[in-house]
Image: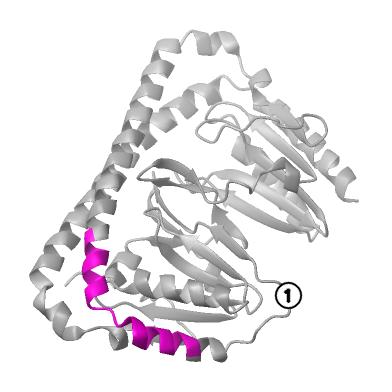
């Protein structure tokens, strides 16, 4: 029988740099940011917005800057593209009260300069391409853009349908979930976790993505000092995570919550205690396990196995439909990248990168 434990394995875990997240996600509502205030100029010392077409070197430029400041020992946060997990969408460099961000400012996450010069600066890679070469291929570019947009919209519709089926599964799981027993367990669990003296802060991130490269999970929280694996039963993991997250924050502890593309809590991290709660995966060893079968009415779940199996099959088929549509989008995306990359003068990007690094160093030193 399919279970949500298998669903967690549906996401292929990939290793990335420390402090890695997705900047947003492909969701039933289209592309959605994990945190709309992440790149707010009010919270940044400096914001560099890179403009340019696909394949023009935006991600490469950010990776060069990240590597430089990591070598110098700065704290660097990497935010990857939820459509192309190999590509960076933003980098944030931190030192004491300084926060400097470099971001891709093109669609679907178009960003404009709010305080140009004072905080934000535009880096226009469009000055490095051969415009006439692109003008000569306008029909191909327009067609590939349209096909890519259609594929993304089709994926969104599949995800919207998958969300509806997931709601049915969650409603079913609620009937077999012992909330009172779970509350008592969470209370005992939190009593064993050290409290903090600072004010509790809640942060939203994304570590899972339905992408052009498949269903991807970043291994960010697997590096926690204490890693706790949640073994699902009957799909009650989202219900357990909802109660756990609420209890953690109400107890005065800071919590970082990772949401899935369908809007459910996927993972929970306590930054002050360096403790993570994640769905148990066969390939990972955990410091301890929490088996959710202890909070389930097994008789109830046995009575609706056939109905759940049907809904779970529908759910997975719809997710596969979304992935197939994004794989189609990938073909058109890389066709566009090839066109733009051939029109680029990449030799000049090294100079732009060196100037960008120099500009950031002046702010930090």
Determine whether, in the image, residue 316 is placed left or right of residue 201.
Answer: left
- In the image shown, does 151 or 214 lie closer to the viewer? 151
The quarter of the displayed image where residue 243 is located: bottom left
- 174 inside magenta stretch: yes
Magenta span: chief secondary structure: helix
Give the answer, above or below, for where 252 lies relative to 20: below
Q: Position of residue 230 (x, y in %)?
A: 39, 79
Query: Which residue in the structure is indicated by mark 1?
Result: 198
Residue 17, percent from left and from top: 60, 59
Q: Is residue 220 visible?
A: no
Q: Residue at horizontal 66%, vertical 44%?
A: 39
On the image, the x and y values in percent for residue 104 come to 61, 36
Q: Quadrant of the N terminus?
A: bottom left
Q: Secondary structure at mark 1?
A: loop
Which region shows up in magenta?
A: 168-187
Q: Residue at x 54, y 44 (%)?
A: 87
- Indicate left or right for 291 with 67 as reference: left
Write the residue at 52% across / 13% down: 134
In x, y percent, where is residue 161?
24, 47
Relative to 98, say whether 135 is above or below. above
Q: Residue at x 51, y 77 (%)?
A: 247
In the rendered structure, the answer to whether residue 195 lies left or right of residue 265 reads right
- Location of residue 57 with respect to 171 vertically, above or below: above
Return the residue nearer the eye: 92 or 184: 184
Picture colour scheme:
one colour
Q: Is residue 15 left or right of residue 76?
A: left
Crowding around mark 1 (Cα neighbors within 10 Å: few <14, some 14 to 19, many 20+) is few
**Location of residue 309 by image quarter:** bottom left
Q: Is residue 159 visible?
A: yes
Say which quarter of the image contains residue 216: bottom left
């Amino acid at each position: 029988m399919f279970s949500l434990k298998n669903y967690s394995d549906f996401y292929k875990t990939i290793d990335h740099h420390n402090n890695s997240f997705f900047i947003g996600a492909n969701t039933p509502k289209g592309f959605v940011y994990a945190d709309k205030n992440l790149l707010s100029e009010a919270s940044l010392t400096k914001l560099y917005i890179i403009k340019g077409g696909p394949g023009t070197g935006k991600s490469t430029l950010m990776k060069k800057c990240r590597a430089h400041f990591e070598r110098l020992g700065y704290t660097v946060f990497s935010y990857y593209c939820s459509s192309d997990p190999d590509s960076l969408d933003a980098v944030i460099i931190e030192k004491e009260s300084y926060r400097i961000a470099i971001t891709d400012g093109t669609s679907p996450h178009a960003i404009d300069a709010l305080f140009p010069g004072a905080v934000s600066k535009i880096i226009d890679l469009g000055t490095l391409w051969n415009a006439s070469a692109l003008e000569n291929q306008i029909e191909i570019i327009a067609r590939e853009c349209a096909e890519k947009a259609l594929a993304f919209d089709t994926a969104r519709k599949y995800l919207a349908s998958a969300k509806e089926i997931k709601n049915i599964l969650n409603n079913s799981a609620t009937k077999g979930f012992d909330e009172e027993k779970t509350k008592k367990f969470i209370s005992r669990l939190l009593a064993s976790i050290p409290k903090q003296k600072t004010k509790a802060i809640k942060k939203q991130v994304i570590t899972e993505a339905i992408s052009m490269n498949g269903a991807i999970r970043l291994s960010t929280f697997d590096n926690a000092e204490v890693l706790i694996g949640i073994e699902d039963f009957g799909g009650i993991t989202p219900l357990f995570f909802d109660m756990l997250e609420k209890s953690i924050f109400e107890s005065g502890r800071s919590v970082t919550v990772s949401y899935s593309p369908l809007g459910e809590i996927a993972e929970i991290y306590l930054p002050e205690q360096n403790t993570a709660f994640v769905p148990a995966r066969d390939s990972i060893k955990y410091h301890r396990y929490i088996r959710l079968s202890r909070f389930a009415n097994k008789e109830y779940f046995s009575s609706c196995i056939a109905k759940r199996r049907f809904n779970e099959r529908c759910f997975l088929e719809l997710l596969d439909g979304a992935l197939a549509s994004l794989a189609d989008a990938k073909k058109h995306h890389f066709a566009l990248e090839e066109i733009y990359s051939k029109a680029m003068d990449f030799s000049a990007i090294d100079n732009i990168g060196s100037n960008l690094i120099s500009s950031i160093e002046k702010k930090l030193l």
